[in-house]
Image: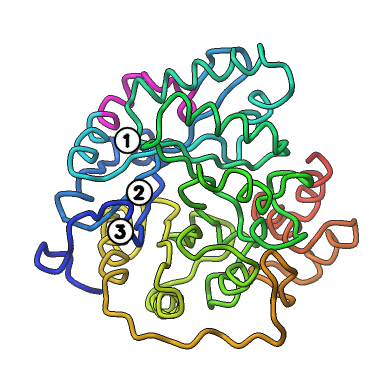
Amino acid sequence: MPSTSPSRMQAPVPVARGPRVILYHQTHHGPNDGPPVSLLPLITHNTGITHVIIAAIHVNEGPGNISLNDHYPDHERFSTLWGEVAWLQASGVKVLGMLGGAAKGSFERLDGEDTARFEAYYTPLRDMVRAHRLDGIDLDIEEPTTLPGCIRLIDRLRADFGPAFLITLAPVATALLVNAPHLSGPTFDYHILERMRGHEIAWYNTQFYNGWGDASNAFWYETIIATGWRADKVVVGLLTNPTNGGSGYVAQPHIDGVIQTMRARHPSFGGVMGWEYFNALPGNQERPWEWAAHMSELMRRPIVRAPAPQQQAPIRPYGQAAPLPPAPHPYPAESVKTLQDLGFSQQQAIAALNSTNGNVEYAAGLLFQD
């Protein structure tokens, strides 16, 4: 892999000059509640990281019941984390907080027409973001949510935090296609959201893994771009370690070639996102910062322009793209078919198998529960 010495790495770049190199940071401590996983190597090794997203903030039942994973954000276990966040910010790295994720409930409590209820749940969230001086918030909507509810949340965040505050979303790749299943609910349309509030949304941390997308080639990404999305708004989300998801990890150097192809075809390429930091390869838990260093160097290599991929037919903005090949997964075909025969899409079936370690019975129960 490339050297991580300061002579090879560039300093963090401003948001406006992308492409971005982003890492989520959810596992804050070592195994068995061990010592804090330090973020400081991301700057002391001059990795070129541009953004870190602290995960995951949850709005729990009862107004004011905010947690960062399983503890209150001000719990003493996070004292190192918040101290290091300040160091990153002082070094030019933007630090956001991720709201939501796989644990459902946060967006349901911030949704609905009851404005008093919204205020009761939103105000403590706003105060928490303000208290820890986060540079933005990442909305990871993995539960049914209404478009008006999301727009109200975006508008309120912008009103409370001003124009420099970063608002991002974290959809799965299928959400940026047309009429494809995704995790934000059947009535939630990201195309409409972009038309209505795209000027407030900095970018989309798009998940190309867990059966909802495929980063092993550029086809899924090109299809998303062909349906009308701006390349600078679509950040390619990757698993940094195969243990961080059920499926979809793409190892180096294969992923390097795919990313370089995307950059060559789209000069305004939005960047890459990694889930997650603590065990990112190739350094794993001993040197997790090496993923960011490598990706930063990759983002700054000279680009050899490549022709745009040929399409069988013209595709109108936000039009229906050509059929996509299925995302790779490790599960038997009969397991996927069993769930599809129950009325679910292939993406939904694979995602459920990811969540249940391939157990078809548990996966079916999870799908019907949703």
Q: Are marks 2 and 3 in contact (CB under 8 Å)?
A: no
Q: Nearer the viewer, mark 1 or mark 3?
A: 3
At label 2, the amino acid type is: Phe
In magenta segment, residue 332: no
- Calculate the distance from the C-alpha at mark 1 to the C-alpha at mark 2: 12 Å
Residue 318 x %, y %: 69, 64
Magenta region: 67-82
Residue that carries the numbered disc 3 in the rendered image? 17
How crowded pointer 1 is (Cα within 10 Å; few <14, some 14-19, many 20+) is rated as: few
Residue 267 x %, y %: 40, 73
Residue ID at (32%, 80%): 303
At label 1, the amino acid type is: Gly
Residue that carries the numbered disc 1 in the rendered image? 34
Task: Please determine whether, in this image, residue 278 is positioned above or below residue 146.
Answer: below
At label 3, the amino acid type is: Arg
State the SS at label 3: helix
Q: Earlier in the sequence, mark 1 or mark 2?
A: 1
Between 270 and 35, the residue placed more toward the observer is 270
